[in-house]
Image: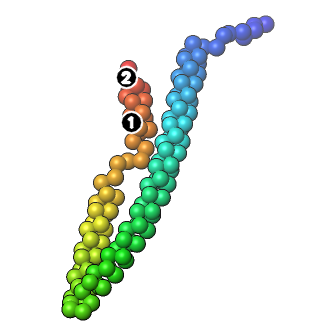
């Protein structure tokens, strides 16, 4: 009668260590994604709040400016003054819209650090 009491083959141990390392790296990368996502959320909320506050304040300032100009030119050039103000506002709105579109088109990747770490990991596994 023979008993099979062989120890695990060395390649199984190496494979397990490799899979354990890969699993740990994947977990680290997923944690990095979570951190980046939380940072991006906080940044976007801050920008959104400041943007809304700025829009409200600018709107109030423009309404006041429009009323001031209309009152100042009421007796002589009222409709011309209002037409010029309207054109200025329309051009400013067009400029802002084009800048916003440009900002969205040229935005960096959200998970840039995570992608760089995955690329480093891939390079490590490619080495013999």
Q: Percent position (x, y) of residue 56? A: 43, 68
Circle 2 crowding by C-alpha within 10 Å: few under 14, some 14–19, many from 20? few
Residue 93 sits in quarter: bottom left
Residue 60 sits in quarter: bottom left
The total number of labels drawn is: 2
Q: Is there CB contact under 8 Å for labels 1 and 2?
A: no
In the rendered image, the vertical position of residue 9 relative to residue 53, given as above or below: above
Q: Percent position (x, y) of residue 68? A: 31, 79
1 vs 2, front mark: 1
Q: Residue 127 carries which label?
A: 2
Q: In this view, does 67 lie to the left or right of 42?
A: left
**Closer to the camera in the image, 88 or 121:** 88
**Closer to the camera in the image, 46 or 19:** 46
Residue at horizontal 26 percent and vertical 68 percent from the top: 95
Residue pointed to by mark 1: 116
In the rendered image, the vertical position of residue 29 relative to residue 88, given as above or below: above
Q: What secondary structure is found at the residue carrying circle 1? A: helix
Q: Is residue 86 visible?
A: no
Q: Percent position (x, y) of residue 26? A: 53, 33
Q: Which colour scheme is used?
A: rainbow
Q: Can residue 52 be seen in this view?
A: yes
Residue at horizontal 30 percent and vertical 54 percent from the top: 106
Q: In this view, does 78 lie to the left or right of 25?
A: left
**Closer to the camera in the image, 115 or 2:** 115
Circle 1 crowding by C-alpha within 10 Å: few under 14, some 14–19, many from 20? few
Residue at horizontal 31 percent and vertical 68 percent from the top: 97
Q: What secondary structure is found at the residue carrying circle 2? A: loop
Q: In this view, does 103 lie to the left or right of 45?
A: left
Q: Outermost residue, right direction?
A: 1
Q: Percent position (x, y) of residue 101? A: 31, 63
In the rendered image, the vertical position of residue 59 relative to residue 101, given as above or below: below
Mark 1 and mark 2: Cα distance apart in space:
17 Å
């Amino acid at each position: 009668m023979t008993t099979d009491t062989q120890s695990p083959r060395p390649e199984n141990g190496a494979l397990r260590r490799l899979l354990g390392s890969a699993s740990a790296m994947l977990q680290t990368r997923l944690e990095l994604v979570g951190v980046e996502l939380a940072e991006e959320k906080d940044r976007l909320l801050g920008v959104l709040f400041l943007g809304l506050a700025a829009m409200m304040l600018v709107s109030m300032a423009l309404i006041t400016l429009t009323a001031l100009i209309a009152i100042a030119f009421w007796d002589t050039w009222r409709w011309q003054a209002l037409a010029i103000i309207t054109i200025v506002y329309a051009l400013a709105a067009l400029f802002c819209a084009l800048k916003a579109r440009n900002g969205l088109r040229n935005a960096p990747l959200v998970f840039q650090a995570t992608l760089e770490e995955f690329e480093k990991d891939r390079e490590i596994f490619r080495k013999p």
